[in-house]
Amino acid sequence: MTSWSIPIGKTRYNQTVYHNINKIPHAKVAGATGSGKTEFLRYLVTYMCMRYSPKQLEFIIIDLKNGVSFAPFQWFPHVHGIFKTVPEAVDAIKKAYETMVERLIEVERLRAVFRREPVYSRLIVLIDEGGELSPAFAVTDEDKAMRRTAMHYLSSIARIGREPRVNIIYGTQRPDADTLPVAIRGQLEGVFCFRTENELDSKIVLRHEGAEKLRWIPGRFLYKSPLVKHDIEIQSPYVPQKVLKRLIEPLIPSDTFYDIPRDEVRFRDEQVQEAGDVACLETPMKTKRWGRIS
C-alpha cells in the first residue's frame, strides 16, 4: 500500500515532521511576500514527482504569476500543464471537477453491484497566488462570473474530493473572505502558515496570533492539522536551482528551444549607459565586473 506521508521539514529539535495527504487531503499555504511559500510549494512538487509514478500522482499547477515560478515543472510527466492566466485556471479547475464527478459515478456503479473499486491516481490541484482568482478583483461582469464558477468548482472539490482522490493545495498571501470563500477555507484542514505581516493576518490563517512573531527566515512556518495537538514550528526544505536543473534537464526534449530576440533580453552584465546626465535605457553597456564600467 502506498504511503502518502510527505516530509515537510524539521523542528528546532531536528525532528522530521510529516503531512499525510491521505488523511488530510486539502491544505492551504499562506504568509507574507518573501516568506518562502512558493519555494515550499516547489519542494512539494519536486519531492512528490520524484517519489511517485505518473500512474500514482498527477498535478494541475495553477501559477498566477504568469507561470514564472513553476515553468520548469511542465516537463515532469506527472504535470498536466502550468496554467498561467485566470481563464486557463478556470478551465483547468473545471477539468479537475469533471474528473472527480466521473470517478464518483464509477464508484457508485461498482458499489451497487459489490464490485471492486479501482485505485485512482491522486490528482492534486496546486494553486499559487490563489488571490488572483477572487471574484473581488474582477474587472467586468463576465470576468466575475468566470471567477465565481472557479470558486464553485473548488468548493465542490474541497467538500467531496477526498474519496475520488482529487485534492487541493491552495497558496495565497492572505486567505480572507475576499480571496478564499469560507466554504472552501473550512475544508482546507492542513495549514502551512509562514510569517505574516501582523496579528490580524495570523488570526485569519491560524485563528489565533503567533505567525507574526516567527523569525524572518525564509521557509519558517507554523504547521497545523487535526492530527497534531498544537501548532508546530518547522523549517521547510529547499530545492536549490542546480538540483532542480539536474533533475528536470534530462526530461526536456532535445528539440525544445525558445528563440527570444537578443534585443529583448537584458543580461546581468549589462548596465545602463549614461548620456550626460540623462540615462539612456536603449543602449546597454557591458561591464568587466558587476558594477564597474569598462
Image (cartoon, rainbow, N blue to C red):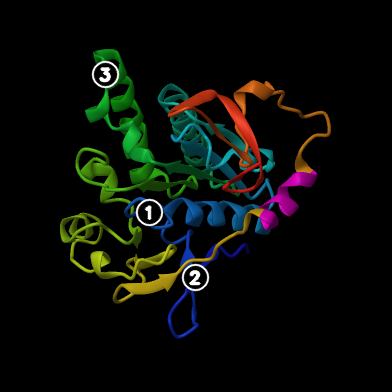
Q: Is 145 included in the stretch rendered in magenta?
A: no
At a point 35% along the width and 50% down the height, the residue shown is 33
- The residue that disc 2 covers is 9
- Label 1 vs label 3: CA separation? 26 Å
Callout 2: 10 Å neighbours few (<14), some, many (20+)?
A: many
Give the numbered dot on residue 139: 3
Q: Position of residue 82 (x, y in %)?
A: 56, 34
At a point 19% along the width and 42% down the height, the residue shown is 177
Given the current orientation, which residue lies at the most extreme front position?
A: 276
Give the numbered dot on residue 29: 1
| Residue 133 figure quarter | top left
Q: Secondary structure at mark 3?
A: loop
Q: Is 246 included in the stretch rendered in magenta?
A: yes
Q: Position of residue 86 (x, y in %)?
A: 41, 26
Q: In the picture shown, does residue 37 fall above or below 63?
A: below
Q: Is residue 14 left or right of residue 173?
A: right
Q: Magenta span covers which residues? A: 242-250
Of 291 and 255, nearer the camera is 291
Q: Secondary structure at mark 2?
A: strand
